[in-house]
Image (spheres, rainbow, N blue to C red):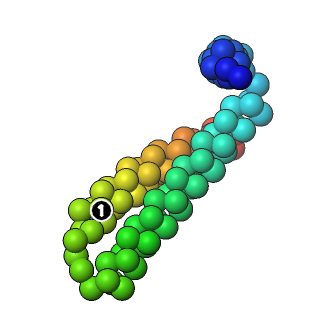
Amino acid sequence: MRRGPIIALGLAAFAQPGLAEQDIWQVRVLRMEGAAVGVRRSAEAVGDVAVNIAESGRIQRLSDLKSKVEQLRRNVVSARLAAEVLHEGVTDTED
């Protein structure tokens, strides 16, 4: 089943001007939730590789650890940006 056209239509609806404030808020919260999940998964991956290195006593997987840490860094940056957008929405509604 192809979901591409359905997703494209949904995204087009969000891109239209006049989007309800509640919908914008929901999109911002969902972005933040998704970013938080990405950070959690990346942190777990870093932990798994670190435990593997510690248990084996070998540093052969050090390149794996480096790539997992880099992915974690990218996910943290993404989460920080999502948090800033969410915060802007909160402060905009208070004005």
- Counting other residues with Cα less than 10 Å from the Cα at mark 1, is it few (<14), some (14-19), or many (20 or more)? some
Left or right: residue 80 versus residue 55 is: right
Residue corresponding to mark 1: 64
Of 14 and 47, the residue lying toward us: 47
Image quadrant where residue 9 sits = top right
Q: Is residue 16 above or below residue 23?
A: above
Q: Is residue 32 above or below residue 14?
A: below
Q: Position of residue 77 (x, y in %)?
A: 41, 50
Which image quarter is the N terminus in?
top right
Of 27 and 2, the residue lying toward us: 2
Q: Position of residue 38 (x, y in %)?
A: 52, 53
Q: Is residue 8 above or below residue 36?
A: above
Q: Is residue 37 above or below residue 59?
A: above
Left or right: residue 63 versus residue 85 is: left
Q: Residue at x 60, y 42 (%)?
A: 31
What is the count of numbered marks? 1
Of 44 and 88, the residue lying toward us: 44
Task: Name the element at disc 1.
Answer: helix
Q: For the residue marked with disc 1, what is the amino acid?
A: Asp
- For the question of whether residue 36 can be seen, the reply is yes
Q: Position of residue 14 (x, y in %)?
A: 67, 21
Left or right: residue 22 versus residue 83 is: right
Which image quarter is the C terminus in?
top right
Q: Residue at x 69, y 32 (%)?
A: 24
- For the question of whether residue 10 can be seen, the reply is no
Q: Residue at x 45, y 46 (%)?
A: 78
Q: Position of residue 86 (x, y in %)?
A: 60, 44
Q: Residue at x 46, y 59 (%)?
A: 42
